[in-house]
Image (tube, grey):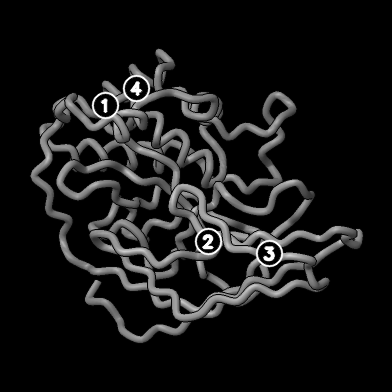
């Protein structure tokens, strides 16, 4: 079970006050592990029951700074990027940045852009206004299978937050801008929900990887905002979790607003 981390970036900070993990059946062993700077708690049962409930309780304080995003990064980017950043320009099975249609679309979207932020904004806005949000239950209507990869998302122009993220990343990479997956939850309701949320991180040379909301959780103004995430975003490294088991995960969130931003 991943330990939700404290986060500090250009516009967004997440401070963890307390974190507790409880088990319906006491494990035979529990240890804290770390992989690629991600901490998680590993519990093992020698003779486990048929079902185990794990409850993770986290108290955190999230702050978003509301001010213009200033960057001097020009477009196209300098191709002399560090190797650990350059890897986020490559294609994979879900992010087909080398697909001819995606490459051509990216080229047309960023045509005339002279700053990286202009290119990022145009790509994210194109995805938001040309892809229809569809809940997960509807994602098996096309070709009889679930589709979340960038190529199918572009073909059918609909999907959930993972579709939005994969297509946004593919277009950014095709445009020569390193980008990667990010995510966690959105603390939007006190009701139990099984919905995790996906967004993206984009590389800006003088600031490193900066997180951007890539789908329907942008502020209501419609365009990519000056802020990159909202205070309701609970960020955590979602690629490491429960393994070697069939599991489902629900979450319940409560929030208190301690200050009202100017906009």
How much space separates mark 3 and mark 2, taking CA atoms? Answer: 10 Å
- Residue 52 on image: x %, y %: 82, 64
- Residue 33 on image: x %, y %: 56, 57
Q: Secondary structure at mark 1?
A: loop
Chain-order first, disc 2 or disc 4: 4
Q: Secondary structure at mark 4?
A: helix
Chain-order first, disc 1 or disc 3: 1
Q: Residue at x 40, y 39 (%)?
A: 180
How much space separates mark 1 and mark 3, taking CA atoms? Answer: 37 Å
Q: Nearer the viewer, residue 189 or 205?
A: 205
Q: Is residue 161 above or below residue 262?
A: above
Which label belongs to residue 238? none
Which label belongs to residue 185? 2
Which label belongs to residue 105? 4
Q: Is residue 151 left or right of residue 247?
A: left
Tell whether label 4 touches label 3 (CB within 8 Å).
no
Q: Residue at x 65, y 73 (%)?
A: 21
Q: Is residue 170 left or right of residue 51?
A: left
Furthest toward the top, the residue is 100
Q: Residues within 10 Å of mark 1 (few under 14, many from 20)?
A: many
Q: Is residue 174 above or below residue 160?
A: above
How much space separates mark 1 and mark 4, taking CA atoms? Answer: 13 Å
For the C terminus, the quadrant is: bottom left
The residue wearing badge 3 is 250
The residue wearing badge 1 is 176
Q: Secondary structure at mark 3?
A: loop
For the N terminus, the quadrant is: bottom right
How much space separates mark 2 and mark 1, taking CA atoms? Answer: 29 Å
Q: Nearer the viewer, residue 75 or 135?
A: 75
Chain-order first, disc 2 or disc 1: 1
Q: Residues within 10 Å of mark 4 (few under 14, many from 20)?
A: some
């Amino acid at each position: 079970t991943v330990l939700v981390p404290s986060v500090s970036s250009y516009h967004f900070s997440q401070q963890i006050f307390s974190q507790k993990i409880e088990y319906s059946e006491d494990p035979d062993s529990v240890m804290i592990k770390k992989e690629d700077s991600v901490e998680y708690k590993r519990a093992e049962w020698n003779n486990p029951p048929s079902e185990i409930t794990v409850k993770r309780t986290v108290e955190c304080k999230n702050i978003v700074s509301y001010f213009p995003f200033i960057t001097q990064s020009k477009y196209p980017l300098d191709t002399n990027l560090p190797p650990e950043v350059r890897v986020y320009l490559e294609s994979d099975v879900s992010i087909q940045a080398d697909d001819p249609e995606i490459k051509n679309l990216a080229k047309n979207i960023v045509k005339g852009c002279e700053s990286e932020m202009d290119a990022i904004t145009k790509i994210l806005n194109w995805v938001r206004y040309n892809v229809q949000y569809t809940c997960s239950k509807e994602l098996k209507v096309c070709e009889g299978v679930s589709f979340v990869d960038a190529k199918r998302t572009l073909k059918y122009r609909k999907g959930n937050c993972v579709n939005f993220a994969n297509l946004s990343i593919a277009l950014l990479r095709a445009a020569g801008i390193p980008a990667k997956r990010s995510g966690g939850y959105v603390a939007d309701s006190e009701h139990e929900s099984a919905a995790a949320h996906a967004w993206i991180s984009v590389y800006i040379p003088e600031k490193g990887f900066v997180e951007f909301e890539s789908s329907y959780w942008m502020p209501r103004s419609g365009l990519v905002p000056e802020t990159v995430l909202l205070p309701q975003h609970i960020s955590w490294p979602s690629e490491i979790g429960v393994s070697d088991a069939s599991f489902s995960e629900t979450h319940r969130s409560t929030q208190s607003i301690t200050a009202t931003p100017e906009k």
